[in-house]
Amino acid sequence: MKFDDTLDAVGLLCPLPVLKARKRLMALQSGQVLRVQADDPAAVIDFPHFCHEQGHSLIEMVHENGIHVYYLQKH
């Protein structure tokens, strides 16, 4: 999948992956995609909730080698 920026949040625990993603999304333009890698078990719940609350789109969630990868599109 094509993305415009990436965030490595592996090793960070809730709420840091979402907080860092929020900050990174602020620097992107509307329609751009942020790829986030995270291994925090709570991120599976946190990222969909964050996108719903902030109006961003969670385009895809995939599991790669023990890491969850989230593709967030800025609104």
Image (cartoon, rainbow, N blue to C red):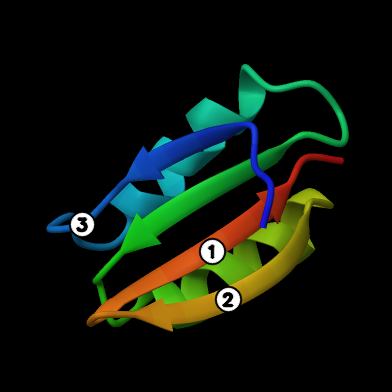
Counting every numbered tag in the picture gives 3
Whether residues under marks 3 and 2 lie with C-beta atoms below 8 angstroms apart, the answer is: no
Image check: 22 left or right of 63? Answer: right
* Residue type for callout 3: Val
Disc 2 to disc 1, C-alpha distance:
5 Å
Task: Read off the residue under disc 3.
Answer: 10
Q: Nearer the viewer, residue 45 or 64?
A: 64
Q: Is residue 4 left or right of residue 45?
A: right
Q: Which residue is mark 2?
A: 61
Q: Secondary structure at mark 1?
A: strand
Name the residue that disc number 1 marks: 70
Q: Residue 51 is drawn in which quadrant?
A: bottom right
Could you say which quadrant of the image residue 63 lies in? bottom left
How many angstroms separate mark 1 from mark 3 (CA)? 12 Å
For the C terminus, the image quarter is top right
Q: Earlier in the sequence, mark 3 or mark 2?
A: 3
- At x 79%, y 21%, the residue is 29
Q: Is residue 22 left or right of residue 42?
A: right
Q: Residues within 10 Å of mark 2 (few under 14, many from 20)?
A: some
